[in-house]
Structures are given as structure tokens and as C-alpha cells.
């Protein structure tokens, strides 16, 4: 099996992992504490490995194509927040549900969107170049967006020690470590060998992570079943509106078809694994946000299968 074969099958791998985790949680409900203890180090490794796939030391190269970068930034950090604001009216009033939706929909993907761009015949070079920009900008703007959408509730939720600690240990530290590894590999002229080996790990690691989350949060999952159909409708609506926004921006910025495909996949895919640690660090009354984030990933992966068929037809090669 090649790495591309593994990535093509990832939606079914994650679905199997979620179902297996729910089964374990139902059979052994007392094991939740042990499962959650194993989750944190694995999540840190996953984030580090995924960050190694982001070409952080080549950040200046992203701005050479100003039209594509302008469309990417305008879409992800201008149009998408407006889409999310419109979709909030269709959500239940539960603050945890709304927080989970905001956390996951406001941050663009930095990992599997490159794979899906490639599978759809998009411009993977532009996608790779834009990834570090998306990552850095979303880290700076996410607190601002949450404050705008949630007001004082955001300050009450995140003004606690665990959030700061989790951000430092599970997001900032892996990001710095990935940058240092890339600098080291580049200096030794061995970047491709090192980074390509690590590229095999995100899919199996994420499968283990969602397995552990499902096993440790099974009670929250079962209690959230009544609201999940409504949340699913919002996530499907987001995929449709993001597709339309990507097509519109591609035409407005006069992007070539392959660049337009990369733009559409950037707007449609979200960075669930980066915000998961933040949701996991919240107190128990916010645990439903964790389920919402994992659920969004599953809906997104199923929706991307439709994207892979539709986007090349909507943006055909000239």
C-alpha cells in the first residue's frame, strides 16, 4: 500500500476507529480515565508530525503568487467567518455546541487538504506554499473571532490555566519542534527523506486519537445524539457555501483552474486536530464541544468525497 492509498481510505479508517472507540467505552465505562491519560501524549505526537508537513521555513515563498494568496486569505479569514456567522442561527442554543462549531469552522486545514487538492488535480505547489500562512494567521485570529462571536463568555471560558498550558505544550511546542526539525533536515540536505517518512504517521495517529476520544467521551456522545442531526445540517451547509465561495473567489481573482481547485479545498476543509487540545482542556460542562469537533471531521471527510467529483467538473482544465 502506498501513502496515497492510505490517505484515500482515511475516511473509512476514522469511521471504524470511532465505532470501535464507542464500543470500548460502552463495554468498559470505568476505563475512561486511563484512556484519556493516553490521549494527551498521542495528540502531542500527532500535532508535531502534522506540523512537520508544513513548510515553515519556506514561508516567504507563499507570497510570490499574490493573487492566489490574496484569494486564500480573503476566503479563509474574511468570507468563511461571515458564512459561519450566518450558520449560527441554525444551531441549538447550547453554548458548548456553538463553541465546538466556532472552534472547528473558523480555522482552515493545514494537512489533508493538500492530499485532497492533489487527488482533485489541483495545484499542490500553491497549496503547500499557502499552508504555513494559514497556520500562523489562524492562530492569531482565532481568539479574535471567538471574542467577536461569544463576547464576555469567551473570556470566562479561556481565562483559565489549562488552556494556556495546553496551547504551549500541544500547539506551540510541537510547532517550534517541527520548525527546528525542518531546519536541521534542510541543512543536512535530507528533508525529503525525513519528512516523507513522518508523512506516513498522521492518518494512523489520528485514527488512534479519535478512537481514544470516542472511548473516553462515550457518555457525552450518547447524550448529544439528539442535536447531532441539526449540527450535521450546519456542517453540510458550510461545505456547500464554502464550495460556492471558493468558485466565486477563483473567478474574481482570475485564478487558473488548478489554483482554483486548491482554493476551494482550502475553504472547505477545517483544522480540527489543532483545536482539539483546546476543547479537551475545558471543564466538563463544555465536553460536548469535543464531540462536535470530531463529528465535523467525519462530515467533512464524507463531503470531500463529493468535492473530489464535483470540483474538477466545476473548474475544468482549459
Image (cartoon, helix red, strand yellow):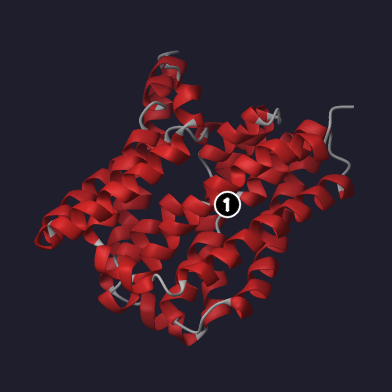
Q: Quadrant of residue 84?
A: bottom right
As drawn, 92 above or below 116: below
Closer-to-camera residue (159/296): 296
Q: Quadrant of residue 132?
A: top right
> Of helix, strand and loop, which one carries label 1?
loop
Closer-to-camera residue (82/173): 82
* Residue 183, position as x, y percentages in the image: 43, 27
- In the picture, the quarter occupied by the N terminus is top left
Q: Which residue is mark 1?
A: 108
- Residue at horizontal 69%, vertical 67%? 83
Mark 1, other Cα within 10 Å: few <14 / some 14–19 / many ≥20: many
* Residue 138, position as x, y percentages in the image: 55, 56
* Residue 303, position as x, y percentages in the image: 60, 48
Q: Is residue 1 left or right of residue 270?
A: left
Q: Across the whole image, how many numbered discs are drawn on residues?
A: 1
Q: Is residue 256 left or right of residue 82?
A: right
Closer-to-camera residue (271/185): 271
- In the picture, the quarter occupied by the C terminus is top right
As drawn, 33 above or below 117: below
- Residue at horizontal 37%, vertical 50%? 172
- Residue at horizontal 69%, vertical 52%? 73
- Residue at horizontal 76%, vertical 48%? 70
* Residue 145, position as x, y percentages in the image: 57, 70
Q: Quadrant of residue 87?
A: bottom right
As drawn, 182 above or below 260: above
Q: Is residue 117 visible?
A: yes
Q: Is residue 46 visible?
A: no
Closer-to-camera residue (223/314): 223
Q: Is residue 95 left or right of residue 169?
A: right
As drawn, 33 above or below 318: below
Amino acid at each position: 500500500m502506498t501513502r496515497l492509498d492510505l490517505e484515500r481510505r482515511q475516511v473509512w479508517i476514522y469511521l471504524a476507529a470511532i465505532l470501535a472507540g464507542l464500543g470500548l467505552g460502552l463495554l468498559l465505562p470505568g476505563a475512561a480515565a486511563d484512556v484519556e491519560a493516553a490521549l494527551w501524549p498521542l495528540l502531542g505526537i500527532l500535532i508535531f508530525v502534522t506540523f512537520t508537513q508544513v513548510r515553515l521555513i519556506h514561508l516567504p515563498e507563499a507570497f510570490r503568487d499574490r493573487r492566489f494568496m490574496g484569494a486564500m486569505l480573503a476566503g479563509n479569514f474574511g468570507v468563511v467567518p461571515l458564512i459561519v456567522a450566518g450558520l449560527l442561527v441554525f444551531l441549538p442554543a447550547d453554548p458548548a455546541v456553538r463553541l465546538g462549531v466556532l472552534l472547528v469552522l473558523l480555522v482552515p486545514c493545514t494537512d489533508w487538504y493538500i492530499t485532497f487538492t492533489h487527488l482533485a488535480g489541483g495545484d499542490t505547489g500553491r497549496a503547500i506554499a499557502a499552508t504555513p500562512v494559514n497556520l500562523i494567521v489562524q492562530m492569531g485570529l482565532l481568539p479574535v473571532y471567538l471574542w467577536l462571536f461569544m463576547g464576555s463568555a469567551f473570556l470566562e471560558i479561556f481565562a483559565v490555566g489549562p488552556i494556556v498550558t495546553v496551547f504551549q505544550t500541544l500547539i506551540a511546542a510541537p510547532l517550534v519542534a517541527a520548525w527546528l526539525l525542518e531546519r536541521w533536515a534542510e541543512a543536512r540536505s535530507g528533508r525529503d527523506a525525513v519528512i516523507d517518512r513522518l508523512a506516513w504517521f498522521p492518518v494512523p495517529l489520528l485514527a488512534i486519537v479519535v478512537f481514544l476520544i470516542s472511548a473516553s467521551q462515550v457518555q457525552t456522545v450518547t447524550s448529544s445524539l439528539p442535536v447531532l442531526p441539526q449540527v450535521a445540517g450546519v456542517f453540510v451547509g458550510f461545505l456547500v457555501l464554502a464550495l460556492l465561495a471558493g468558485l466565486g473567489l477563483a473567478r474574481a481573482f482570475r485564478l487558473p483552474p488548478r489554483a482554483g481547485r486548491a482554493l476551494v479545498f482550502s475553504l472547505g476543509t477545517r483544522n480540527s486536530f489543532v483545536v482539539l487540545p483546546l476543547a479537551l482542556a475545558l471543564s466538563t460542562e463544555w465536553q460536548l464541544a469535543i464531540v462536535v469537533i470530531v463529528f465535523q471531521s467525519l462530515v467533512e471527510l464524507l463531503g470531500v468525497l463529493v468535492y473530489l467529483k464535483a470540483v474538477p467538473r466545476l473548474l475544468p482544465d482549459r
